[in-house]
Amino acid sequence: MQNHLVASAEPTHPLAEALLDWYDTSARTLPWRVSPAALKSGAVPDPYRVWLSEIMLQQTMVEAVKPFFARFTSLWPTIEALAAAEADDIMKAWAGLGYYSRARNLVACAKVVAELGAFPQTEAELRKLPGLGAYTAASVAAIAFGQPAAVVDGNVERVMARMLALPVPPAKAKNAIREAVAAMVPPVRPGDFAQAMMDLGATVCTPRRPACMFCPWREPCLARQRGEQDLYPVKAPKAEKPTRVGAAFVAVRRDGAILLRKRAGTGLLAGMAEVPNSDWNARQDGDTTERAAPFHARWREVGTAEHGFTHFGLTLKVYRTDGVETAKAPPGSWWSQAAEWEGEALPTVMRKAIRCAIPTAFPPKAKGKP
DNA sequence: CACCCGTGGCC
DNA sequence: TGGCCAAGGGT
């Protein structure tokens, strides 16, 4: 029932026409994308890959997603395979990508879809699935199923803020933006149109120094006409970001294993692994955090680990003790051998803390030029 | 609607 | 170097 090839009597908006022409020659090649040429030749997108990529791309840059997408599709090539997987294995594979509720919703969504037998194909039905909000439901409907849905993400907001010279932050004009986009969605190639808007925002209409000379919309763009493209989108005032402090405890057994435990199922880093640690408070008077140690031992302070979360910064005092006996492992915890650390569901802040205590753990990836 | 929820790259 | 930013969703 996919209607990628279903024509319509409605005309395509001139701006959509120009954008699709630009997309035909300028589309990015992405592992989860069916190229416009392939699509025209009859290739059909895999809804599973479209959905998985859209979830991973939420608030996450393309380059960060690529290795995770490759890993996931290798481990779980289909939605049925993913639905049958152990949730813990999925959390482990997600470790490092951030926003871990996405991974929990991914598991829940996979089970629902596997039960249904297939993804629903309409925006309204997709919207009911866990982890699919307005953006993702529209994007899957458009890209995977050829539905004329209005896809509005951060890229589209920025593009439209400049097109319309919006005098307010895009978040304050969501309805106006969605309506403006909906009026442009073409009756054919709505999925390409959505991806073209996002490619335009990502490669031409960029947050800083937009490359207006290469933009298919440089003539109609109101901000560009005024030479004020750098003034948009209007920024919302930023909220203050407090700093919290806490303590983390790296217990090293005589064979080199370290003590880990699992975080609570809700809230920050829900369901992820951690080294034992104190509460993270706004202020710490003295070193009372040391009382949060998992057991009594000679804890040496070995340094601090800094980490920035979305809405607060964290400074963790890191303590280490060595030569621990196995009998001292508290219930709910487990000993993890060095060879297993990379595979644990450890978020980045915990990897930093462990690296602080054990410098050979989690070596930074070599990425610089030789 | 305001707030919560990660991470790494960039200038 | 630190603030800003990137294909949002849930509550």
Image (cartoon, coloured by chain):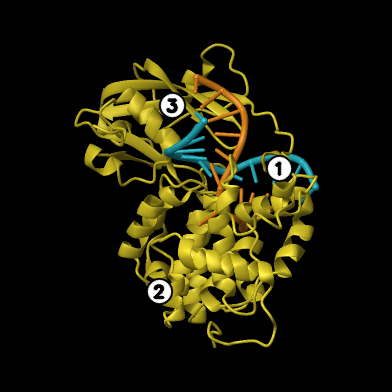
Chain colours: A yellow, B cyan, C orange
Q: Is residue A21 above or below residue A231?
A: below
Q: Which residue is at the front of the view, A162 or A140?
A: A162
Task: Work out whether residue A140 can be spotted.
Answer: no
Label 2 with label 3: CB-CB less than 8 Å: no
Q: Which residue is mark 1?
A: A227
The residue under the point 40% across, 28% down is A353
Gap between marks 2 and 1, in whole Å?
A: 51 Å
**Of callouts 3 and 1, which one flags the residue occurring earlier in the amino acid sequence?**
1
Q: Which residue is at the front of the view, A188 or A253?
A: A188
Q: Position of residue A146 (x, y in %)?
A: 56, 78
Q: Position of residue A170 (x, y in %)?
A: 73, 49
**Of callouts 2 and 3, which one flags the residue occurring earlier in the amino acid sequence?**
2
Q: Nearer the viewer, mark 2 or mark 3?
A: 2
Q: Which mark is residue A248?
A: 3
Task: Work out whether residue A239 can be spotted.
Answer: yes
Q: Which residue is mark 2?
A: A80
Label 2 with label 1: CB-CB less than 8 Å: no
Q: Chain of mark 3?
A: A
Gap between marks 3 and 1, in whole Å?
A: 52 Å
Residue C5 lies left or right of residue B6; in this view the side is right
Check disc 2: other Cα within 10 Å, few if <14, some if 14-19, many if 20+: some
Q: Position of residue A234 (x, y in %)?
A: 73, 41
